[in-house]
Image (cartoon, helix red, strand yellow):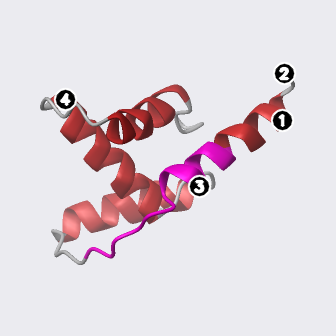
Amino acid sequence: MDQPSQSNLIDKKFVECYSNKVSLETELSETLYNTMKDFVLSNPTWDQYKLINSALATFLVQNGCKDNSVSEIYLNQLFTPSKSF
């Protein structure tokens, strides 16, 4: 499978994972906010939503979550990391 087709498939699966959305509001420390902002600005394939979803999925899976949807989000980000890594 060529790179553009694979990328489109991954993007489609990503959208499917997030078809049911819930809005979340939280306070962040200034350090976390600035680090998140810098990361997103230097990685055009990421945005704040993808970053938060990835961080939450990683935390949940590493702490025993067995939900297949959460595991899918975790695995998708694990195998499609940011180009800056």
How many residues crowd mark 3 within 10 Å: few (<14), some (14–19), many (20+)?
few
Q: Earlier in the sequence, mark 4 or mark 2?
A: 2
Q: Secondary structure at mark 1?
A: helix
Look at the image and say whether residue 22 sits in the magenta stretch: yes
Give the label, 3 or 4, closer to the camera: 3
Give the distance between the C-alpha atoms of the residues marked 1 and 2, in whole angstroms: 7 Å
Where's residue 74, x and y in %?
Answer: 38, 35
Q: Are marks 1 and 2 in contact (CB under 8 Å)?
A: yes
Q: Earlier in the sequence, mark 3 or mark 2?
A: 2
Hey, what amino acid is under mark 1?
Ser
Look at the image and say whether residue 50 sits in the magenta stretch: no
Where's residue 75, x and y in %?
Answer: 44, 29
Tag of residue 15: 3
Q: Which residue is mark 1?
A: 5
- Residue 33 appears in view: yes
Q: Which residue is mark 4?
A: 62
Hey, what amino acid is under mark 4?
Gln
42 relative position to 22: left or right: right
